Amino acid sequence: FSPAGFAASDVEQVAYTLASGEKVSLTAGSELAGDGDEADSASYETVWRFAGDADTDLDQDKVRSMLSALSSYVSGQITPAAGADPAACGFDAPLAVVQVTTADGTKTLTYASGTDGDYLMVEGDSSVYTVDASVVSALLYPANQLKAE
Protein backbone atom coordinates (compact mmCIF):
# COMPACT_ATOMS: atom_id res chain seq x y z
CA PHE A 1 0.00 0.00 0.00
CA SER A 2 1.16 3.54 -0.73
CA PRO A 3 0.58 5.83 2.28
CA ALA A 4 1.18 8.93 0.17
CA GLY A 5 -2.01 8.16 -1.77
CA PHE A 6 -1.01 9.30 -5.25
CA ALA A 7 0.47 7.83 -8.42
CA ALA A 8 3.62 9.14 -10.10
CA SER A 9 1.49 10.37 -13.02
CA ASP A 10 -0.57 12.55 -10.62
CA VAL A 11 2.41 14.66 -9.53
CA GLU A 12 2.56 18.21 -10.89
CA GLN A 13 5.30 19.70 -8.72
CA VAL A 14 7.97 18.46 -6.31
CA ALA A 15 9.91 20.63 -3.89
CA TYR A 16 12.37 19.06 -1.50
CA THR A 17 14.97 19.98 1.05
CA LEU A 18 17.96 17.70 1.55
CA ALA A 19 19.75 17.14 4.86
CA SER A 20 22.45 19.54 3.61
CA GLY A 21 19.82 22.29 3.47
CA GLU A 22 19.80 22.42 -0.33
CA LYS A 23 16.34 23.14 -1.72
CA VAL A 24 15.29 21.79 -5.13
CA SER A 25 12.00 22.56 -6.86
CA LEU A 26 10.76 20.78 -9.98
CA THR A 27 7.68 21.34 -12.06
CA ALA A 28 6.01 19.35 -14.84
CA GLY A 29 5.17 20.89 -18.17
CA SER A 30 3.96 19.77 -21.56
CA GLU A 31 6.29 20.04 -24.51
CA LEU A 32 5.98 19.00 -28.11
CA ALA A 33 7.26 15.44 -28.44
CA GLY A 34 9.94 14.53 -30.95
CA ASP A 35 11.65 16.94 -33.32
CA GLY A 36 8.55 18.96 -34.21
CA ASP A 37 8.73 18.23 -37.97
CA GLU A 38 5.36 16.49 -38.04
CA ALA A 39 3.01 19.29 -37.05
CA ASP A 40 -0.02 17.36 -38.34
CA SER A 41 0.40 14.60 -35.76
CA ALA A 42 1.78 16.71 -32.94
CA SER A 43 1.79 15.02 -29.59
CA TYR A 44 2.89 16.34 -26.25
CA GLU A 45 4.86 14.75 -23.46
CA THR A 46 5.40 15.67 -19.84
CA VAL A 47 8.84 17.12 -19.28
CA TRP A 48 10.21 18.07 -15.87
CA ARG A 49 12.22 21.26 -15.32
CA PHE A 50 13.56 23.23 -12.40
CA ALA A 51 10.81 25.58 -11.23
CA GLY A 52 11.62 29.02 -12.65
CA ASP A 53 14.24 27.65 -15.06
CA ALA A 54 12.67 26.28 -18.24
CA ASP A 55 16.00 26.35 -20.10
CA THR A 56 17.92 23.72 -18.13
CA ASP A 57 17.41 20.18 -19.39
CA LEU A 58 16.99 17.60 -16.65
CA ASP A 59 17.74 13.89 -16.70
CA GLN A 60 14.14 12.72 -17.14
CA ASP A 61 15.03 9.15 -16.09
CA LYS A 62 16.26 10.38 -12.70
CA VAL A 63 13.11 12.49 -12.28
CA ARG A 64 10.89 9.52 -13.21
CA SER A 65 12.77 7.38 -10.67
CA MET A 66 12.14 10.04 -8.04
CA LEU A 67 8.41 10.20 -8.87
CA SER A 68 8.18 6.43 -8.73
CA ALA A 69 9.92 6.42 -5.33
CA LEU A 70 7.56 9.08 -3.97
CA SER A 71 4.50 7.04 -4.93
CA SER A 72 5.98 3.63 -4.10
CA TYR A 73 4.61 1.03 -1.79
CA VAL A 74 5.99 0.75 1.72
CA SER A 75 7.33 -2.47 3.16
CA GLY A 76 5.87 -2.04 6.64
CA GLN A 77 4.03 0.20 9.07
CA ILE A 78 4.77 1.01 12.70
CA THR A 79 1.92 2.67 14.52
CA PRO A 80 2.66 5.00 17.45
CA ALA A 81 1.05 2.49 19.84
CA ALA A 82 3.59 -0.09 18.69
CA GLY A 83 6.41 2.16 19.85
CA ALA A 84 7.50 4.05 16.77
CA ASP A 85 9.90 6.66 18.15
CA PRO A 86 10.46 9.25 15.39
CA ALA A 87 13.86 10.24 16.83
CA ALA A 88 15.04 6.60 16.87
CA CYS A 89 13.93 6.35 13.25
CA GLY A 90 16.07 9.36 12.33
CA PHE A 91 13.32 11.94 11.95
CA ASP A 92 15.17 14.41 14.19
CA ALA A 93 17.61 14.78 11.24
CA PRO A 94 15.67 13.77 8.09
CA LEU A 95 17.42 12.86 4.85
CA ALA A 96 14.79 14.70 2.80
CA VAL A 97 11.56 16.60 3.34
CA VAL A 98 9.49 16.50 0.16
CA GLN A 99 6.41 18.51 -0.74
CA VAL A 100 4.45 16.82 -3.51
CA THR A 101 1.71 18.73 -5.32
CA THR A 102 -1.07 17.00 -7.24
CA ALA A 103 -4.47 18.25 -8.41
CA ASP A 104 -5.75 17.23 -4.96
CA GLY A 105 -3.33 19.46 -3.05
CA THR A 106 0.11 19.28 -1.46
CA LYS A 107 1.42 16.58 0.88
CA THR A 108 4.64 16.63 2.84
CA LEU A 109 6.62 13.39 2.98
CA THR A 110 9.61 13.07 5.30
CA TYR A 111 12.29 10.43 4.75
CA ALA A 112 14.84 9.43 7.36
CA SER A 113 17.40 6.75 8.13
CA GLY A 114 17.34 5.13 11.55
CA THR A 115 19.46 2.55 13.29
CA ASP A 116 17.80 -0.35 11.50
CA GLY A 117 16.46 0.98 8.21
CA ASP A 118 14.91 3.79 6.21
CA TYR A 119 11.59 5.35 7.06
CA LEU A 120 8.79 7.58 5.77
CA MET A 121 6.30 9.79 7.58
CA VAL A 122 3.35 11.36 5.74
CA GLU A 123 1.93 14.67 6.95
CA GLY A 124 -1.31 14.10 8.85
CA ASP A 125 -0.53 10.43 9.57
CA SER A 126 1.09 9.45 12.87
CA SER A 127 2.44 6.14 11.56
CA VAL A 128 6.03 5.51 10.59
CA TYR A 129 6.51 3.43 7.43
CA THR A 130 9.53 1.34 6.52
CA VAL A 131 10.83 1.88 3.01
CA ASP A 132 13.48 0.23 0.90
CA ALA A 133 16.88 1.93 0.73
CA SER A 134 16.47 2.23 -3.07
CA VAL A 135 13.45 4.49 -2.50
CA VAL A 136 15.43 6.87 -0.33
CA SER A 137 18.44 6.90 -2.68
CA ALA A 138 16.18 7.92 -5.59
CA LEU A 139 15.17 11.04 -3.63
CA LEU A 140 18.56 12.38 -2.63
CA TYR A 141 19.65 14.11 -5.84
CA PRO A 142 21.16 17.58 -5.40
CA ALA A 143 20.20 19.93 -8.23
CA ASN A 144 23.52 19.53 -10.08
CA GLN A 145 22.98 15.75 -10.33
CA LEU A 146 19.55 16.18 -11.94
CA LYS A 147 20.87 18.13 -14.92
CA ALA A 148 21.02 16.24 -18.22
CA GLU A 149 24.50 15.48 -19.44
Image (spheres, rainbow, N blue to C red):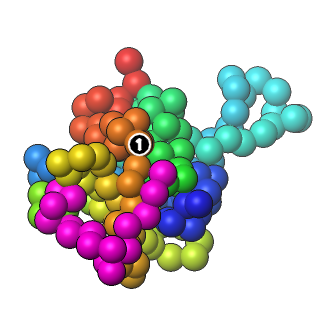
Horizontal side of 86 relative to 5 (left or right) equals left
Residue 115 visible here: yes
- Compared to residue 4, the image places residue 90 above or below, namely above
- Compared to residue 57, the image places residue 54 above or below, namely below
Q: Nearer the viewer, residue 79 or 47?
A: 79
**What's the magenta bit mostly, secondary-structure-wise?**
loop
Horizontal side of 62 relative to 39 (left or right) equals left
Percent from the top left, x then y, of residue 97? 27, 59
Give me the residue at 88% from left, 35% from top. Answer: 40
User: Which residue of the protein is positioned furthest toward the right in this rendering?
Assistant: 40
In the rendered image, the quadrant that contains the N terminus is bottom right
Query: Badge 1: how crowded within 10 Å, few (<14), some, or many (20+)?
Result: some
Name which residue type carries label 1.
Asp
> Would you name the residue on which mark 1 appears?
132
In the rendered image, the quadrant that contains the C terminus is top left
Q: Nearer the viewer, residue 103 or 39?
A: 103
Q: Is residue 88 magenta?
A: yes
What stretch of residues is rendered in magenta? Answer: 75-90
Q: Nearer the viewer, residue 94 or 51?
A: 94
Percent from the top left, x then y, of residue 90? 17, 57
Horizontal side of 93 relative to 4 (left or right) equals left
In which quadrant of the rendered view does residue 43 lie? top right
Q: Is residue 81 magenta?
A: yes
Percent from the top left, x then y, of residue 94? 19, 56
**Label 1 element class:** loop
Give me the residue at 24% from left, 38% from top. Answer: 142
User: Which residue of the protein is positioned furthest toward the top in this rendering?
Assistant: 149
Give me the residue at 35% from left, 59% from top. Answer: 120
Give me the residue at 30% from left, 48% from top. Answer: 118
Residue 53 visible here: no
Percent from the top left, x then y, of residue 105? 50, 76
In which quadrant of the rendered view does residue 111 lie? bottom left
